Image: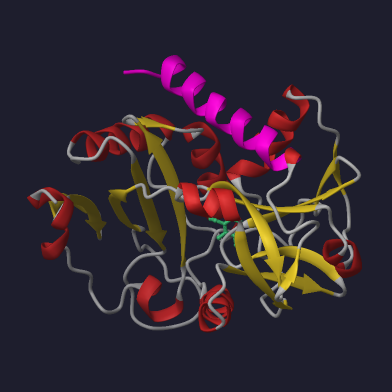
Amino acid sequence: MSADLLDPVVFLSVNGVAEWLPLSEARLPVLDRGFIFGDGIYEVVPVYGRVPFRMDHHLARLARSLGAVGITNPFDNAGWKARIFELIDGFADDNQMVYIQVTRGVAKRGHAFPADTQPTVFMMNNPLVLPTAALRADGAAVVSATDNRWLRCDIKSVSLLGNVLMAQHAAEQGAAETIMFRDGNLTEGSSSNIWVVRDGVLLAPVRDHRILEGIRYSLMAELAESVGIAFTARAISEAEVRAADELLLTSATKEVIPITRLDGQPVGDGRPGPVYARLYAAYQRAKEQSRAQFAR
Ligand code: PMP
């Protein structure tokens, strides 16, 4: 591993003072509201061959989440892109994962919004570690739980304790992810969106306050259309999930992977299915197209 993979250069802006510095030297005041209250928003942008994938979608979601919690967006899209490219260019790997976090800033502790703070901005990257061929061939095992998170899951907040506990629930059972049900219907995974295939139709929960709309949500709808798979967004009952022909999981870093076991039971015939295979292939084509279209 090269030196800059171990200690890459990151971007940090605190109280309006912006710096590029090695990760190991980045410091935050303890009164940052991200630390004190989890009062912040984040984004994760996958980068293939030094080209960010669906970057405009990620920046739109970042702006939407910041707006939803009343944090001033520190940069316009051109400002974000300039910094994202600088981060990408300073990193050794061609495939990367850019992490962006914006908090409400540093202020004397008090719950309501402080006056006159400047948002804290932190940006770093990591190598993008894609699912292994073995995982794609065998599929993932997941477990389930009742969704006990707050009712603004549409905001990509750094207040992730609910999601952290769900991820730990999976880890303790040797599973890849916990998928959640609220009021008897599927919501999402602890850090992923979940898709159900029944009778050749791709189903997803409706985009509302109960789930984070993954950047792969609209992508999967587009890919399904491009390969002639019908797509429907609607409430999906727990019984339908357990009787699914196929279950799929999507996220920036997992792309799309098949789920082949749920709570120890096989999903469908227990093997990755044909709808997964077509959407995975379409996903890889979309990555190639994006690299060609946005090559720098
Ligand atoms: N839901 C949750 C709770 C997540 O954390 C993620 C991953 N950020 C997703 C869905 C999938 O979003 P994306 O496709 O943008 O990675």
In reply to whether residue 291 is colored magenta, the answer given is yes
Residue 106 placement (x, y as % from top left) = 31, 70
- 31 lies left or right of 37: left
Residue ID at (38%, 41%): 75
The residue most toward the left is 3
- 194 lies left or right of 17: right
- Relative to 176, residue 156 above or below: above
Q: In this figure, which colouring scheme has been used for the structure?
A: secondary structure
Residue ID at (36%, 18%): 295
- 108 lies left or right of 69: left
For residue 212, what is the image quadrant? Answer: bottom right
- 83 lies left or right of 235: left
Residue ID at (13%, 64%): 24
On-image quarter of the C terminus: top left
**What secondary structure characterizes most of the magenta part?**
helix
Residue 35 placement (x, y as % from top left) = 36, 76
Q: Determine if residue 67 is in view.
A: no
Residue 43 placement (x, y as % from top left) = 46, 51
- Relative to 81, residue 58 above or below: below
**Which residues fall within the magenta stretch?**
275-296
Please state the quadrant of the image where ligand 1 appears. bottom right
Q: Determine if residue 174 is in view.
A: yes
For residue 278, what is the image quadrant? Answer: top right
Residue ID at (33%, 74%): 107
Q: How many marks?
A: 0
Query: Quick one: 228 or 32, which is closer to the camera?
Result: 228
Residue 249 placement (x, y as % from top left) = 64, 54
In reply to whether residue 15 is colored magenta, the answer given is no
